[in-house]
Amino acid sequence: MVTIGNFFFKYRNLLFIFLYLALFIPSPDIFTPENFGENYYWWPIIIGLVVTITGQAIRGATIGLAYIIRGGKDKKVYAEKLVTEGIFNHCRNPLYVGNILMLLGVGILSNSLIYVGILIPLFLFIYQAIVLAEENFLRNKFGAQFDAYCQRVNRWIPNLNGISKTFEGMHFNANRWILKEYNTQFVWLVGITLILLFKYPQLTNSSEDTRNNLLFVILPVLLIIYLFVKYLKKTGKMVA
């Protein structure tokens, strides 16, 4: 599993591209009019948005409270120090938990049985392998310190005991969250917009004109915000 994890760690960014594109693969629906009535579409919309926004909130809290060098080094698992504060004091892999919930949420939002039933379990297997590879590196580098951390904090299931003290005792760095997440936020919001407008014509009364008008407003606004944040980052006018 460690070998598998090291392989997928190297190519994990490509994995996300594939998973986002897979949202639009034709699939049987999870929620259907036969099982959930005429207004069945509200089920995937509400559940999907709640789950995916929860995932994004976990990522935001993690990045805003305690910075961790992500992305490895030379496409390999790497860490300069063992980060245990912030959300890492409640879950060893909060960023990955956030990613899982974000992708599961958009999968539910797309009402795709193939995505939720096949691709998400495959994604969980890959993430488990990546985490085992990271833990192998951390255990070799930090030894007893990492073992003690593992005994105290769960790998996947967040322990919310003391979470209020965590937020009270640390400063949330909003700039860092924005600068580190604006790429992810842009892709995520564009994906949600496309799913809602193309998957659920009920939201626009089956009017292609209304749908297209919304697209011509929402997508450019998101792009302008994205380019503005990128500009602020490149010019150093916004720093973490």
Image (tube, rainbow, N blue to C red):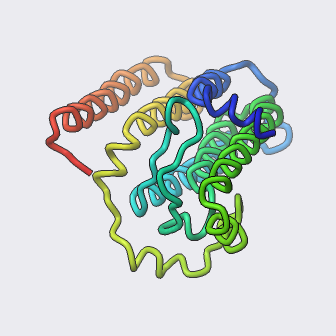
Q: Is residue 175 left or right of residue 64?
A: left
Decide if residue 10 is in sight here. Answer: yes
Does 166 appear above or below 106? below
Q: Is residue 110 left or right of residue 169?
A: right
**Residue beneath the point at 16% across and 40% down:** 236
For residue 110, which quarter of the picture?
top right
For residue 66, which quarter of the picture?
bottom left
x then y, percent, for residue 195: 57, 29
x then y, percent, for residue 233: 23, 37
Decide if residue 199 is in sight here. Answer: no
x then y, percent, for residue 14: 59, 23
Q: Is residue 141 left or right of residue 115?
A: left
**Residue beneath the point at 37% across and 39% down:** 182
**Residue beneath the point at 61% across and 21% down:** 21
Does 102 appear above or below 212? below
Does 92 appear above or below 52? below
Viewer-proximal residue among 220 and 202: 220
x then y, percent, for residue 130: 69, 41
Q: Is residue 163 left or right of residue 240?
A: right
For residue 142, which quarter of the picture?
bottom right
